[in-house]
Amino acid sequence: MAAGCSPGYVLQQAAGQLKLLASRRPIEEVLADPATPAGARERLILIREARAWGEREFGLKHTDSYESYVDLKGRPVSWLVTACPPDSLKPESWWFPVVGRVPYLGFFDLDDARAEKEALEAKGLDVNVRSVPAYSTLGWFSDPVFSTFVQWPVHTAVDTIFHETTHATVWIPGSVSTNEALADVVGEQGARKFLAVRFGPDSPELAAFESSQSESNRFHVFALELNAALKEAYALDLPRAEKLEMKAAILRRGRERFRTFRDRFTSRYYREFDRLEWNNALIASIAVYREEEATWRALFDLKGGDLRAFLDAAKAIAAAPDPEAALKIATGRAEQIVPR
C-alpha cells in the first residue's frame, strides 16, 4: 500500500472506515424503533425493495451492503481531494490495492482534507475539495445506508443504490472514469425502469426523475464545454505563461456565461456553482464522470436497452486483458483505440 500513498494516510483512513462501520445499526432495528420517523422508515423499505429488484431484474451483485444504517448527523460521509497542474487537466493520481490508480484521495475528516489541499497547493497544483454523500467499498465491507439516502428525493436514493452497487458488481482497476461512467448509466437506466414499475409511467416520482436528469444534462453540457476549451488551450504550443493567461480568460468568460442561466436551475449545487473556486481540479473532477458515458450508452443501445445483457457485456469487458480496447470493439469504435 505504501507504494501509492504513505502508510500514515492508509492507517488514518482505515481508522475512519472502522469508526464508521462501528456506528452502523441493522436496518431491521431501525425499522422497529418507534423513534424512527415514518418517512425514513418508508424510504429504507423502498431502498431494500430497489436492491432486490436490481439483483433480480438485471443482475446486480448481492452483497451484505445496505443492510445497516448510519446517521451522519447532517455531515457528509467523507471528502475527496483532487489536484491538477495549473496548465493541464490531467489529474494527479494515487495507487491502491484492488482499485488500482485513482485521481483522488478520500478523507473522513475535513481538517485532514484541508491539510492535504494546502500541501498540494504548496507544490503549485490546482486543488479541489468536495463532499461525498455516499461511496462503495466494492463489496469488501458491508456498506451502510447513510442518513443522506432518506433525505434525498426517491429517484436520487434509488439511482445512488444502483450506481454504488454497480461498483461492487463490475470494477475495472485503474480506470475511475470508465467505472464511474458505467455506474452512471446503470444508475440512471435502472432508476428509470424501477420507478416506472414501482410507481407507474405517469407518476410524480418518475416525472421528478426525468426533470432532474434534464437539469443534470444541461449542467454537464456546460461543464464539458468548459473542459474542452481548457483542454484545447493547454494543447497549444505556447509558453506556460500564455496558457495560464488563456486559462484565466476562459474561466472568466465561462463564469460570466454561467451567470446568465444559473437561475434556471432548481438544484442548489448548480445554482451556486459559480461561487466555487474554479480551477483545473474542479473542472476535471466533473468531466471524469461524463467523458466516457457516450461509449457505455452506445453499448447499452446495442443491447436493446436490456440492462442484464448490458451488465453481462460489461463484466466480459472488465475481464478482458485490455478492457479499454474491448469496450471500443464491443461498440464498433475500434478505430479509436490508440496503441499504448
Image (spheres, grey):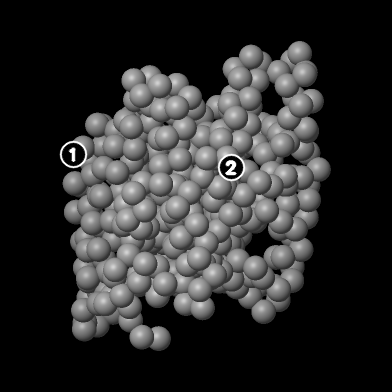
Residue located 66% across and 16% down the image: 37
Residue 299, label in figure? none
Q: Give the quadrant of the C terminus.
A: bottom left
Q: Residue 250: where, in percent of width, then height? A: 22, 60
Instruction: Name the kind of residue labelled 2 in the image.
Output: Glu
Q: Residues within 10 Å of mark 2 (few under 14, many from 20)?
A: some
Amino acid type, label 1 = Thr
Q: Is residue 183 left or right of residue 256?
A: right
Residue situated furthest bottom in the rendering: 340
Q: Which quarter of the figure has residue 5? A: bottom right
191 vs 60, nearest the viewer: 60
Locate residue 220, reporting x and y percent.
Answer: 30, 48
Q: Nearer the viewer, residue 314 or 6?
A: 314
Residue 260's label in the rendered image is 1
Residue drawn where x is 47% and y is 32% of the image = 194
- Residue under label 2, please give it: 55
Secondary structure at numbered mark 1: loop
Residue at horizontal 65%, vertical 20%? 41
Of badges 1 and 2, the one in the foreground is 2
Q: Nearer the viewer, residue 160 or 311?
A: 311
Q: Secondary structure at mark 2?
A: helix
On the image, which quarter does residue 229 sit in?
bottom left
Residue 272: x, y in percent? 36, 38
Rendered residue at 44%/69% (across/down): 91
Q: Is residue 182 visible?
A: yes
Cα distance between the residues tagged 1 and 2 = 43 Å
